[in-house]
Amino acid sequence: MTAIVQREAQEAPAVAKAGYVLPGLGHLLTGNVVTGVGMLSVDAMLIVAVLGIPDLPRVIAFDTWGGIPIHPIVAVLSLFGIAAAQFWTAHRLVQPKVLSELERNSNYNLFIREFTRNRTGMIGLFGVVLMIGVTLMTPLIAPFDPDDVGVGTKLLAPAPWAYLTGAPDAFLLGTDVYGRDFFSRLLYGGRISLSIGFIAFGIAASIGTAVGAVAGYFGAWVDRGLMWFVDMLLSLPRLVLLLAIVGMFRVQGVKSIFLIVVILGLTGWMGVSRIVRSQVLSLKQQDFIQAARALGYGSTRIVFRHLVPNALAPVIVYCSLAIGGTMLAEAGLSFLGLGVAPPTSTWGTLVNDGREYLRQSAPLTVFPGLCIVMAVMSFNLLGDGLRDALDPKLRGTK
């Protein structure tokens, strides 16, 4: 039996223990600047969320789903979950896990090491973590009901310093034309925009993976028929297709959000299917697939238990890049007035609402526009890092 040599855990510097006081500080003091700054940014988000806990009763009064305060409950659970992850990461710096040579050279640990060395990917990762964290903890961070009219004078300019010092009638990002707190609307709008991006592309990735795997595995007329259908859909301009479908099924309220999610999901799966098909065409000739056939496994088991898991690496990268594109598509629809119905806000609807008052109050358009740019950039940077870490040919080149 092959002997497995245990690797001794390296002793961490004494300054690494500073992470127990403030997660991320230990990483920063030991020279891991990107991770340290990213974790300290997450700490700042958690501190702001903790300060909002006393306002939970007020939030529960308006932020409920079917009479149940689901969003405030998710916010509190997310707060404790992210804080636990922060301290666990700080602890792992002080006491690294002892790995055997076999574990150290596993695909998972190779991926983790390569990804954490990629500064671009880590910047994108922390950008995505911050956006998701703020989205989940919005009820603890937002100071007002986003739809509450007249909390302040209309079209007030941003006053961050006055707001932080507790001055009366001061708003962090000002107010909109109806006197609603714009910071609260921006946070709640981000919750909708990010949810649409993730769920819509989750639908697209599921459909595309299934279609591409079936087409690549069975080949012949199945492959030709499915790829002909994919090519036909790709030949249609997506924006025109989206406008036509949304125009046909105009709905109001919560149904408009579900409609946008479904439409974006059903019109965004073609690229995934082509990627999965190309991977399956090469994988189905490998020895492990031939062995599965010899053992008498059915086609369904071979496709979804053996082929699809081994073809997911490029799909993960593509998804991380395409989520930003899906968010842009939703923002475009909302900007054209065909997205989520008011008063529900998304970043796209906020840009659309603010364009009429661009001269009086430019922040109404600039801030949601910057949020869209930062979200898309974070997902693109994360996708680049995942691509480099998952591709053996690119490992160690950056």
Image (cartoon, helix red, strand yellow):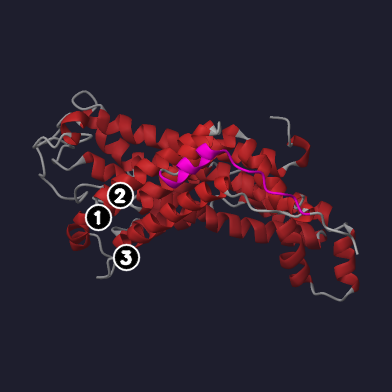
Position of the C terminus by quadrant = top right
Marker disc for residue 175: none
Are dots 1 and 2 in contact, CB under 8 Å? yes
- Disc 1 secondary structure class: helix
Question: For the residue marked with disc 1, what is the amino acid?
Answer: Ile
Residue at 53%, 39% in the rendered image: 14
Question: For the residue marked with disc 3, what is the amino acid?
Answer: Ile
- Name the foreground residue: 321 vs 210: 321
Q: Earlier in the sequence, mark 2 or mark 3?
A: 2
- Disc 3 secondary structure class: helix
Residue at 55%, 46% in the rendered image: 94
Marker disc for residue 49: 2
Q: Position of residue 393 (x, y in %)?
A: 78, 37
Judge left or right: residue 254 versus residue 175.
right
Residue at 81%, 54% in the rendered image: 5
Question: For the residue marked with disc 2, what is the amino acid?
Answer: Ala
Q: Residues within 10 Å of mark 1 (few under 14, many from 20)?
A: some
Separation of disc 1 and disc 2 at Cα?
Answer: 7 Å
Separation of disc 2 and disc 3 at Cα?
Answer: 17 Å
Q: Is residue 125 magenta?
A: no
Q: Earlier in the sequence, mark 1 or mark 3?
A: 1
Marker disc for residue 53: 1
Are dots 2 and 3 in contact, CB under 8 Å? no
- Name the foreground residue: 79 vs 352: 79
Marker disc for residue 70: 3
- Name the foreground residue: 268 vs 7: 7
Q: Position of residue 184 (x, y in %)?
A: 24, 45
Q: Which residues are magenta?
A: 6-21
Residue at 20%, 35% in the rendered image: 164
